Amino acid sequence: AIERTFSIIKPDAVAKNHIGAIYNRFESAGLKIIASKMVHLSKEQAEGFYAEHSARPFFGALVSFMTSGPVMVQVLEGENAVLANREIMGATNPAEAARGTLRADYAASIDENAVHGSDAVESAAREIAYFFSAEEVCPRTR
Ligand code: CMP
């Protein structure tokens, strides 16, 4: 089915000038970018976005990293988009990420791992709404 997923290019990958290379991976895989913007997250925005991880030992480092510089946030649309994007990204820990995935090619560590992607259609809807108003999402008919 055609799905939407939410994606973040994290501060490490933005700082290393990998935005275009990463967008090329999405588009080459047939995913369409239907919303996109650059944001420098506040502490409150990052804490809210990652609220489900608030009890984890890495939460403080995660929020600190995600607010360390601008990120690109985007909505990707396409066939099986949630799983397709997870395959493009590779495993959370770049040491375990398959060859040719974004994390294998661009991530330095599990903390600074280049990209985020929704893990399910339900979390995608919540994450998209966290960053984009309905008018900012532009469904593509061609
Ligand atoms: P992300 O998909 O953005 O969701 C939470 C982030 O926490 C994750 O990517 C990792 O970058 C980071 N993180 C750090 N340590 C861990 C861990 N042990 N397990 C999962 N995520 C971790």
Image (spheres, helix red, strand yellow):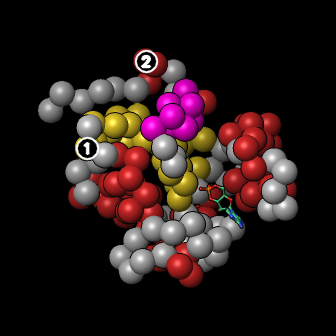
Q: Quadrant of residue 130?
A: top right
Amino acid type for the residue under numbered disc 2? Glu
Residue 21 at x, y percent in the picture: 37, 64
In which quadrant of the rendered image does the C terminus lie?
Answer: top left
* For residue 75, side relative to residue 33 (left or right): right
Residue at x-position 43% and y-position 41%: 5
Nearer-the-camera pick, 126 or 28: 126
Q: Tell me the CA gap for discs 2 and 1.
A: 22 Å
* Secondary structure beneath label 1: strand
Residue holding disc 1:
79
* Secondary structure beneath label 2: helix
Ligand 1 image-quadrant field? bottom right
Residue at the far top in the pictured view: 135
**Residue 125, above or below 78:** above
Amino acid type for the residue under numbered disc 1? Glu
Residue at x-position 38% and y-position 62%: 87
Residue 71 at x, y percent in the picture: 58, 50
Residue holding disc 2:
135
Residue 38 at x, y percent in the picture: 54, 42
Residue at x-position 81% and y-position 56%: 56
The answer to which of marks 2 and 1 sits earlier in the sequence is 1
